[in-house]
């Protein structure tokens, strides 16, 4: 995932996550951010692994 897409997604969801934080529900916003970065890291790992397999052949 491109860095610019990640920044745009984070900017779009910044207000709702901050709203949850103000309502003393900061754990939910932290969980959502953790899931987002987990998905991004899994995608990047898959790209890295596919590139490594192509270079190894």
Image (cartoon, rainbow, N blue to C red):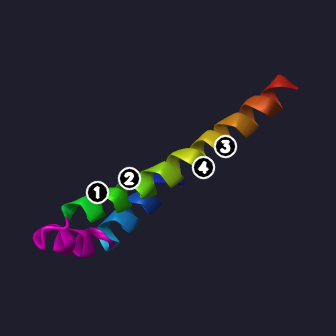
Mark 4 falls on what kind of element?
helix
User: Foreground residue, 11 or 42?
Assistant: 42
> Nearer the observer, disc 2 or disc 4?
2
- Residue found at x 60% / y 49%: 43
Report which quarter residue 20 is drawn in. bottom left
Task: Please state, as top left, top right, bottom left or bottom right, where the N terminus lies in the image.
Answer: bottom right
Mark 1 falls on what kind of element?
helix
Q: Are marks 1 and 4 in contact (CB under 8 Å)?
A: no
Q: Are marks 3 and 4 in contact (CB under 8 Å)?
A: yes
- Residue found at x 44% / y 58%: 36
Query: Can you identify the residue that label 2 sits on?
Result: 34
Please identify the dominant SS of the magenta region: helix
Query: Can you identify the residue that label 3 sits on?
Result: 46
CA gap, disc 3 and disc 1: 24 Å
Query: Can you identify the residue that label 1 sits on?
Result: 30
Q: Give the side of residue 35 with respect to residue 1, left or right.
A: left
For the residue carrying disc 4, how many other residues have a C-alpha within 10 Å: few (<14), some (14-19), or many (20+)? Answer: few
> Nearer the observer, disc 3 or disc 1?
1
Query: Can you identify the residue that label 4 sits on?
Result: 43
- Residue found at x 52% / y 54%: 39
Q: Which residues are magenta?
A: 13-25
Sequence order check: which comes first, mark 3 or mark 1? 1
CA gap, disc 2 and disc 4: 14 Å
Sequence order check: which comes first, mark 3 or mark 2? 2
CA gap, disc 1 and disc 2: 6 Å
In this rendering, the answer to whether 51 lies above or below 55 is: below
């Amino acid at each position: 995932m491109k860095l610019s897409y990640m920044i745009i997604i984070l900017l779009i969801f910044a207000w709702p996550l901050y709203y949850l934080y103000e309502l003393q529900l900061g754990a939910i916003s932290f969980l959502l951010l953790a899931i987002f970065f987990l998905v991004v890291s899994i995608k990047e790992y898959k790209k890295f692994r596919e590139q490594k397999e192509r270079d190894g052949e």
